[in-house]
Amino acid sequence: MPERPERFERLIRPHARLIAGVVRRVCGRRHQALVPDVEQEVYLAIWKRLGSGKEIEHPASYLYRVALTTSIAVVRRHASGSTSLDDPAVGDPPEPQPGGIPQAERARIIGEVLERLEPDEARALRAYLAGFSHVEIARLYGWSESVARHRVYRTLERLRAEADRRKEAGDGR
C-alpha cells in the first residue's frame, strides 16, 4: 500500500495544529503528560480509517471529531486506571481485535513478526511496545517524528494482519 502513507501525510499535514490543539484542550493541565500518547492514538485511528478504503469527505470536521472523541476516551481510560493496550480508541467503530488469540500466542506472533522486520522497523516496534510515544522514539533513534510514526504504524499493521491471518486459519501457528 504505497499510497496509504502519502494519503496519510496529505491529510495530516494541513491539520496537525488542529489535532494538537484539540488534544491539548481535552487533556488540559491535569493530563498534560498524556498528550503524546493521545496524539498517537488519534493518528492511529486516522491511519486505520485510511486503511479501510473509506473516503473522508470533510477532512477538518472528521479530524476534529476523531481527535475529540479519541482524546476523551484516552483521558477517561487513564482516569479509571486502565492502561491496557487492548482498550479501543473511539475515533471510528472498533476494528476486530485479535481477542480470540491467547496472550502467549500474541507474544509468539510479535516475536515472529519482529524477526522478519527491517532493523529500524523492529526497533520502532520494540520501543512502541515498551511504552514509548512516536515522539520519544524519534528522539531515541534520531529520526523525524513522521518517520518514527510511520515505522510504528507500518509494523503494527503487519502485526494485525498476521494475527488476523492466523485467526482466520484457525491454527495455533
Image (cartoon, helix red, strand yellow):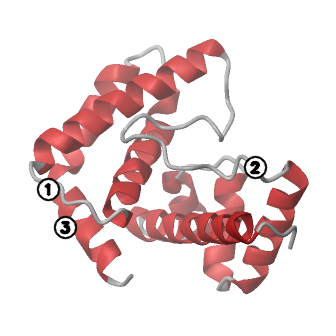
Q: Nearer the viewer, residue 2 or 19?
A: 2
Q: Is residue 85 left or right of residue 172?
A: left
Marks 2 and 3 in Cβ contact (< 8 Å): no
**Which residue is located at x 37 percent, y 42 percent?**
92
Label number found at residue 10: 3
Give whichever of discs 2 and 1 has the lower sequence position: 1
Q: Is any part of residue 32 visible from this angle?
A: no
Q: Position of residue 34 (x, y in %)?
A: 50, 31
Q: Are marks 1 and 3 in contact (CB under 8 Å)?
A: no
CB under 8 Å between discs 2 and 1:
no
Disc nearest the viewer among 2 and 3: 2
Q: Which residue is depicted at the point 56% across and 50% down?
A: 96
Work out how far the residue at label 1 is from the one at label 3, CA to CA, in angstroms.
Answer: 7 Å
Compared with 170, 58 (above or below) is above
Query: Mark 3 belongs to which amino acid?
Result: Arg
Task: Locate residue 91, reporting x and y percent.
Answer: 36, 39
Q: Is residue 17 visible?
A: yes
Question: Residue 35 bears which disc, if any?
Answer: none
Tag 2: amino acid? Gly
Q: Which residue carries the number 1 mark?
A: 14
Quarter occupied by residue 18: top left
Is 168 located above or below residue 114 in the figure? above
| Label drawn at residue 100 | 2
Q: Residues within 10 Å of mark 1 (few under 14, many from 20)?
A: few
The one nearer the camera, 87 or 117, is 87
Amino acid found under the numbered disc labelled 1: Pro
Picture coordinates of residue 54 (x, y %)?
25, 60
